[in-house]
Amino acid sequence: MQTRGEARQDEILGVVAELIAEVGWEGLTADAVVARAQTSKTTLYRHWPGGRIDLVTAALRRAADCAPAAVGDAGSVVGDLRACLDSMVDVLVGVHGIALIELLNAARRDDELRAQMRRLFDASCQENAAALTRNAAARGVRLDGRLVERALEVAFAWAMSQIVFDAVPPDAEARQEFAEHTLLRLIEGTP
């Protein structure tokens, strides 16, 4: 159970995501966060001393933490891949997805933001790939963790492109097909 302080921090980070979705990286200011979240600059800088980059990093982590667990044990490699894909889609829809698209655009022009987003993305892929690889090993299946990481990067790109270009998340059937016929083949190294 969250403490009152943790719940308040989550509220502030939700405001950060909303503001990024509305005004983008360039429009995200401490004053805007303070006004919308009805908090103080002192509170912001106490929890996120690095300012805007720390706020955005925390908001992205929060979005990932709010999604269902990316890799539990779904009983098979394909099931685990599908769970990862479902988790990605959950993060990408709604305000977090809009904020992420805004941040990706801004990252092209901001080296610090780009580097931080890359670190978060890589860490997420590594963490999920390690869990997927452990699950597979427990079932007697040996996977190359590097191939699993690359497959998860492809999964993110696919999910993002489906949401951006089709304006809706891929449905359950499309996710299952992508997990079975694309991601599994990438991991197995088969054409």
Image: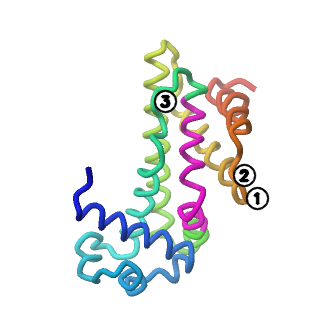
Residue 158 against residue 149 in the figure, above or below: below
Residue 108, image x, y percentages: 59, 70
**Residue at x 34%, y 76% (from the top left corner):** 51
The answer to whether mark 3 and mark 1 are in CB contact below 8 A is no
The answer to whether mark 2 and mark 1 are in CB contact below 8 A is yes
Q: Which residue is mark 2?
A: 162
Residue 35 against residue 133 in the figure, above or below: below
**Residue at x 73%, y 36% (from the top left corner):** 173
**Among the 4 quarters of the image, the one containing residue 56:** bottom left
**Residue at x 58%, y 42% (from the top left corner):** 86
Boundaries of the magenta span: 80-101
Q: Nearer the viewer, residue 30 or 111?
A: 30
Earlier in the chain: of badge 3 and badge 2, it is 3
**Among the 4 quarters of the image, the one containing residue 57:** bottom left
Mark 3 or mark 1, whichever is nearer to me = 1
Find numbered disc 2 in the image and state the secondary structure of the residue it sits on. Answer: helix
Instruction: Give the residue type at disc 2.
Output: Gln
Q: How many numbered discs?
A: 3
Residue 176, image x, y percentages: 68, 33
Find numbered disc 3 in the image and state the secondary structure of the residue it sits on. Answer: helix
Instruction: Give the residue type at disc 1.
Output: Phe
Q: Quadrant of the C terminus?
A: top right
Q: Which residue is mark 3?
A: 132
- Colour scheme in the image? rainbow
Q: Which residue is mark 1?
A: 165
Cα distance in 3D space between marks 2 and 1: 5 Å
Outermost residue to the top: 140
Instruction: Reply yes or no: does residue 174 show up in magenta.
Output: no
| Few, some or many residues within 10 Å of mark 1 (<14, 14–19, 20+) | few
